[in-house]
Image: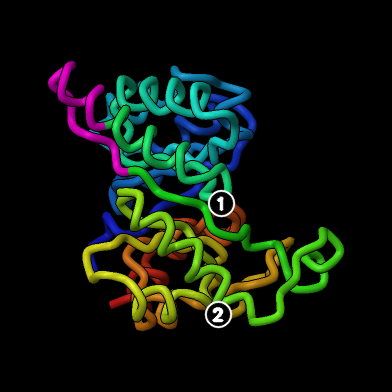
Amino acid sequence: MSPSKLIVALDVLTFQEAEEWVERLSPKVDLFKVGSTLFTAAGTPVIEMIRQKNKEVFLDLKFHDIPNTVVGACRAAVRLGVFMLTLHIMGGERVLRESVAAVTEEASQRKLRKSLLLGVTLLTHLGRETLGHLGWDLTGNMEEEVVHLARIASENGLDGVVCSPPEVHSVRQALRQDFLIVVPGIRPLGSPLHDQVRVSQPKEAIEAGADYLVVGRPILESQNPLEMVDLILKEIQ
């Protein structure tokens, strides 16, 4: 697994911080996640900055709205040149189908690379108790629910899904081998869990079938971030 399979989450509050981290980690990291916090603080210039440094962007804004709104957001993401972007599978099959069509059409019309479209299954901070309080009837188990959502994503043309470590093996077994699995909630040995519930170590996630690992705070809060990146890459390999 190459360093490009490690996604570093730029969970910072300013453009300047993001640029400093990209500069600092660029020798070993090729792919950076821009999520809601950074995008709200810094907007599209932070994506342009990362692209200008010849690095790739995982735009993780988890679009969840009516079809017309999500489709428009997906088209805008393609124009920004992002490598991957996310939307919620629970937005419904129409949202998924129309977003896939929009991303394909936008890339073709503008002669751009088609961004990979990933469906969000269940967020990694959610456990059975929380979902129960929200009214979910989990008569089976969470893995079965995630696999069900992943199948919906695949059937409607998405390139892959985002799921937590405990569900990776089941999703990989249920779906085609070229269906991408992006995994947050990665915690190297000895790292604190923070607000995550369903977590895993890098080696375990890769062995289960993950394609990309998203790591944020264990790297950004490390006393030696590049050493932490090396540790993660070594564990993966």
Q: Which numbered disc flags the more N-terminal residue, 1 or 2?
A: 2
**Amino acid bearing label 1:** Leu
Question: Disc 2 marks which amino acid?
Answer: Leu
Q: CA distance from mark 1 to mark 2?
A: 16 Å
Residue 136 badge: none
Q: Nearer the viewer, residue 158 or 4?
A: 158
Q: Position of residue 128 (x, y in %)?
A: 75, 73
Q: Quadrant of the N terminus?
A: bottom left
- Which residues fall within the magenta stretch? 104-116
Note whether 165 is above or below 68 in the view shown: below
Figure quadrant of the C terminus: bottom left
Secondary structure at badge 2 equals loop
Q: Farthest residue in the right direction? A: 133
**Residue assigned mark 1:** 220
Can the viewer see residue 21 in this picture?
no
> Residue sitting at 40 percent across and 49 percent down?
118
| Residue receiving disc 2 | 189
Left or right: 132 in relation to 237 = right
Whole-percent x, y for residue 77 in the image = 38, 26
- Residue drawn at point x = 31 percent, y = 26 percent: 78
